[in-house]
Image: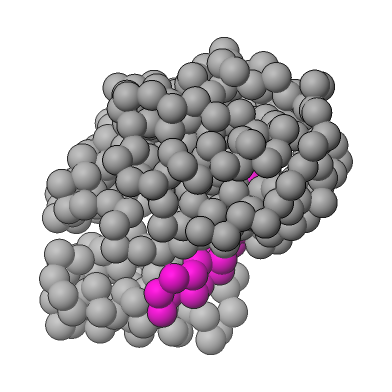
Amino acid sequence: MSISHSQTTNVTNPEISVVLPVYNGEKYLVEAIDSILAQTFTNFELIMIDDGSTDGSQQILREYKRRDSRVRVIVRENRGLATTLNDSIEMAGGAWIARMDQDDISLPHRFEKQLQWLEKTGADIAGSWAQRFGTSDKRTVRLRQTDEAIKMEMLFCSPFAHPSVMMRTALVKQLRYDKAWEKAEDYDLWERAAEASWRMTNVPEVLLLYRVHGSQISTTTSARQQQLTLQIQRRYWQSVFEMMRLDPQLIDEVLNIRGAAAVISNMDAVDDALAGLLQYSHGEARDAILSHLTRLYFRVAADCPDIVSRWSKFFPGSGWRETVSTKVKLWLLREFRIRPNGRCFESLKKLYIA
């Protein structure tokens, strides 16, 4: 363990409260904490609750607390992530809450740039792009920027990298994380925040390095997470369709495609649901829907004889090269009956579908 920072400034009125929950995080914890303490914007408190760790995490936390007056540490028995996040939020004295995870790295200008972006946009929550690292997967996760686009993206997936977000403390304290949705507690919070009319944005720049490693999520946890995610999506689809006065009976057909088996019984209903969303969307929000529409149609191509023509009607103005490329992919998936629950689909997805 190498701890290099020493900070004696007593921050009695922090602008930002950084919430970093800890549970058996010894392996990467020093890097994560150092990346926070090295921020160019320094007026923050760092709140770390150790949620019953059995490794060396507690020793690391106590050493940082001794060296830096901005660090606040609580060590206690295990109560789960959602409760730990809520307890940290309750302690927060800053106007903004910045999330951070024990195995990621915040780039030095993260807080400075997020505060500038929040002031510029007037948003209530700002995430950022994230760069994956730790495995051969080093993709940059580029997230939607505008409020409208983020709220359309939320129909299909979580629109934020959770450890990258900065959000208004007063609003978070009103909603809090819901323990009933643990394993998808962030997605649940974003959905309720959208319902509460939070203004949302992402800084269009990589401000977080997101570590990918094998111990992040188990098969059992993944299945539970997928189940909860679909429930949150259904709730949000119903809310959006009610607001847009679209037929809620169309929702099931789209969500059936989102499931592991990608079951379709009425492709006309899927077309109508997505066409309805497009009717009310513009700019980046429309691009988000069309991107997810294409991915949905990849998933059902094997069992839909006219998938190419169905997809094409949504893209009358697309460039020739893009249109032909996607048509060929859809045709191949259809011709060779490549379904999303098979290894072949997963291999192709890594190459050119996702």
Residue at image coords 55%, 29%: 73
Check the picture and name the quadrant holding the C terminus. bottom left
Q: Is residue 317 left or right of residue 225?
A: right
Residue at image coords 60%, 42%: 64
Residue 35 % position (x, y): 65, 54
Front residue of 174 and 157: 174
Q: Is residue 87 above or below residue 142?
A: above
Rendered image quadrant of residue 22:
top left
Tell me the magenta residue range: 124-142
Residue 277 % position (x, y): 49, 42
Q: Is residue 75 left or right of residue 65?
A: left
Q: Is residue 31 above or below residue 72?
A: below
Residue 125 in view in this figure: no
Q: Is residue 291 above or below residue 102?
A: below
Front residue of 14 and 261: 14
Rendered image quadrant of residue 78:
top left
135 drawn magenta: yes
Front residue of 139 and 240: 139
Front residue of 187 and 308: 187
Q: Is residue 265 left or right of residue 239?
A: left
Residue 309 % position (x, y): 35, 70
Residue at image coords 53%, 86%: 321
13 drawn magenta: no
Q: Is residue 181 left or right of residue 88?
A: left
